[in-house]
Image: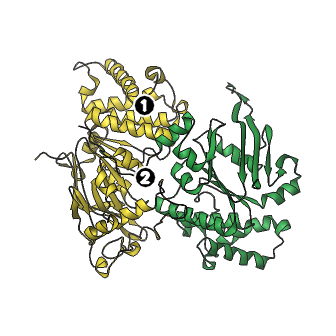
Chain colours: A green, B yellow
């Protein structure tokens, strides 16, 4: 039995309806009895369309959102039972990379400040001196294919792909075991996407990271992930090995999604249908 | 020989910026006939959208200026038209759809009234689209325009179309809004539709429906389409032809089966190699190092040479002219034949 990094057990989340000036809105069930588990060292893909509950689930793993019912365990620890200090310590080991590298870096902070900030926040856990933090930032920048010469630069001086590398370096700064990747390549060109995906694979091999990869791009998920879960309207529709889901989808929804995937292969007879 | 619907001939576009003039389109040649869907692909900053915007003359000059070239819509040079004439052309002969369906509808007006406005404006130039008697009063024409708006919504697959004319944009989902915009673009019965990343903001399942709709409209309306996208999968699924752009040049063009099946330009090959497919082994994906060059001081000769793994010293001498590598299939690379053969040996 492989060790589990993340266990999500029967989680539901209901956002209460609001009563306002223009009448009441109904409560929204964003997650409905979702259960899944992620093994240590694997890449787990979560696929769903907009509004399916991907983000709610991700935020719940970071404990930015409290589930209405059910439990989430990271490394065996139940998030809802942790004290604030314990939660802070745990968060050093769970980091996230967001979708839009243009919006997730503060334009007024230098790369040095961006990458060292998490180490300052988790000072208590990590106990690094200022000097060590700078060295470590330089080290992580080299790891993601940038270098110490970039420490004094600002986000606007970098291309989209380089910015996403900075985001990854920042996420790695606290030495996490679990990395949540929220559509990390969907704002990038395919050529750059390929580089970032290869970087992620390389980092996983070197650092033994566990990835929780959220995406609606099935081709990318198939490339990167060992196991996949499909979520639709808050309900987990299907989960299993990548190969199985992509080659022999069982549910109607999975078949529809896989069928809608635009594949790059020369069509037998494209276009002009006279 | 008949005149093509759209013929772009040797189009150059320069944009002035604080750092100098950027030569963003460097001699574009493209011919689109009715019934053809041309995919325009490339990385960001390659000039795809600028080509589309140039055809509908939506770039203000300055900063844009066209030192050379012509854009012929059925033989008439769009670049020489006066603003008023151009206004007539947009909506009636050229329809456009943009990426983000949310920002292209006015949230304060009902869908129906926005569609009716477009229909009324289009009818000023071409009264036949409303199918009214000549000399019909404005009330009668508005009624006909509303009828047309309902028909169009129905045609683009919006359920219960007539009732939804009175809804506001926020009551529609992203995919439905894109359908409304397609209806809006088609209402003036354009001959040429320019779709700039129409499905980038949408989910894959909705994307497939919208692409299907565009494909069907080409047949219904006998139009030509330019589909701007960065997704080669979308091109393979939808287009009849494709032009691959790099740094302001069309580097390869031809029928989709030929270009995607037997890419002859190193850039097309690199783009295709960076998309994961069923067969791609984990870690085996090939990226394309570097970025699109600065177009204020572009590299000499072939603009792709600095990133190209096949580059020779001769590549930097002059801009390579397109070479024929198959029926209607051209690639602007001095080693096109050789590289194409290498990759498919």
Q: Is residue A26 above or below residue B297?
A: above
User: Could you tell me which secondary element the residue under label 2 belongs to?
Assistant: loop
Please state if A21 lies on the left or on the right of A160 as rendered: right
Residue carrying label 2: B231
Q: Nearer the viewer, residue B221 or B105?
A: B221
Q: Residue at x 33, y 55 (%)?
A: B261
Q: Residue at x 87, y 56 (%)?
A: A86
Answer with mark 2 or mark 1, whichever residue precedes in sequence: 1
Mark number, residue B114: 1
Q: Residue at x 36, y 70 (%)?
A: B304
Q: Is residue B12 above or below residue B296?
A: above
Please state if B8 lies on the left or on the right of B299 as rendered: left
Image x and y of residue A69, in percent: 80, 37
Please state if B111 lies on the left or on the right of B29 as rendered: right
Image x and y of residue B127, in percent: 25, 27
Q: How dense is the environment of label 2, judged by Cα within 10 Å: few (below 14), some, or many (20 and up)?
A: many
Q: Is residue B25 above or below residue A232?
A: below
Q: Is residue B303 above or below residue B244?
A: below
Q: Is residue B60 visible?
A: no
C-alpha span from label 2 to label 1:
31 Å
Which chain hosts label 1? B
2 or 1: mark nearer the eye: 2
Q: Nearer the viewer, residue B40 or B84?
A: B40
């Amino acid at each position: 039995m492989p060790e589990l990094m993340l266990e999500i057990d029967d989680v539901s989340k209901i956002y209460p309806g609001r009563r306002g000036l223009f009448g009441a809105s109904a409560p929204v069930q964003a997650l409905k009895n979702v259960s899944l588990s992620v093994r240590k060292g694997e890449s787990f893909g979560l696929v769903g369309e907009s509004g399916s509950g991907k983000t709610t689930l991700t935020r719940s793993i970071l404990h930015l959102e409290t589930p209405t019912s059910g439990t989430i365990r990271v490394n065996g620890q139940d998030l809802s039972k942790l004290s604030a200090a314990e939660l802070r310590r745990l968060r050093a080991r769970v980091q996230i990379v967001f979708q839009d590298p243009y919006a997730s870096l503060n334009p007024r902070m230098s790369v040095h400040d961006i990458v060292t900030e998490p180490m300052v926040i988790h000072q208590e856990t990590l106990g690094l001196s200022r000097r060590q933090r700078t060295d470590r930032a330089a080290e992580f920048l080299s790891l993601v294919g940038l270098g110490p010469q970039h420490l004094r630069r600002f986000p606007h001086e970098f291309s989209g792909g380089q910015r996403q590398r900075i985001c990854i370096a920042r996420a790695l700064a606290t030495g996490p075991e679990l990395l949540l990747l929220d559509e990390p390549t969907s704002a990038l060109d395919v050529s750059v996407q390929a580089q970032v995906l290869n970087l992620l694979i390389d980092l996983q091999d070197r650092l033994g990271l566990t990835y929780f990869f959220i995406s609606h791009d099935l081709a990318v998920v198939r490339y990167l992930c060992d196991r996949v879960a499909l979520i639709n309207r808050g309900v987990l529709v299907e989960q299993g090995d990548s190969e199985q889901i992509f080659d022999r989808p069982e549910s109607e929804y999975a078949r529809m999604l896989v069928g809608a995937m635009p594949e790059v292969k020369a069509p037998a007879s494209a276009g002009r249908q006279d | 020989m008949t005149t093509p619907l759209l013929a772009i001939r040797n189009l150059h576009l320069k944009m002035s910026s604080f750092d100098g003039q950027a030569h963003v389109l460097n001699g574009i040649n493209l011919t689109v006939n009715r019934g053809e869907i041309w995919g325009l692909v490339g990385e960001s900053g390659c000039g795809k959208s600028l080509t589309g915007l140039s055809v509908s003359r939506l770039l203000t000059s300055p900063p844009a200026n066209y030192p050379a070239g012509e854009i012929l819509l059925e033989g008439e040079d769009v670049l020489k038209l006066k603003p008023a004439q151009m206004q007539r052309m947009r909506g009636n002969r050229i329809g456009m759809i943009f990426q983000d369906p949310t920002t292209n509808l006015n949230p304060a007006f009902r869908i129906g009234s926005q569609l009716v406005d477009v229909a009324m404006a289009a009818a000023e130039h071409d009264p036949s689209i409303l199918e009214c008697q000549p000399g019909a009063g404005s009330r009668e024409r508005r009624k006909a325009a509303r009828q047309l708006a309902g028909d169009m919504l129905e045609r683009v697959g919006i359920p219960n179309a007539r009732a939804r004319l009175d809804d506001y944009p926020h009551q529609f989902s992203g995919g439905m809004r894109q359908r409304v915009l397609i209806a809006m673009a088609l209402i003036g019965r354009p001959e040429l539709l320019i779709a700039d990343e129409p499905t980038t903001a949408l989910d894959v399942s909705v994307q497939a429906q919208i692409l299907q709709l565009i494909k069907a409209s080409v047949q219904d309306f006998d139009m030509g389409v330019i589909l701007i996208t960065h997704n080669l999968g979308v091109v393979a699924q939808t287009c009849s032809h494709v032009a691959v752009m790099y740094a302001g040049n069309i580097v390869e063009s031809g029928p989709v089966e030929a270009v995607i099946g037997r890419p002859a330009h190193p850039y097309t090959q690199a783009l295709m190699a960076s998309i994961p497919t069923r067969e791609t082994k984990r870690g085996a994906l090939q990226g394309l190092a570097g970025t699109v060059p600065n177009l204020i001081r572009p590299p000499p000769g072939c603009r792709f040479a600095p990133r190209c793994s096949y580059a020779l010293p001769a590549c930097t001498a002059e801009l390579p002219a397109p070479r024929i590598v198959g029926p209607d299939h051209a690639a602007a690379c001095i080693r096109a034949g050789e590289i194409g053969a290498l990759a498919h040996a």
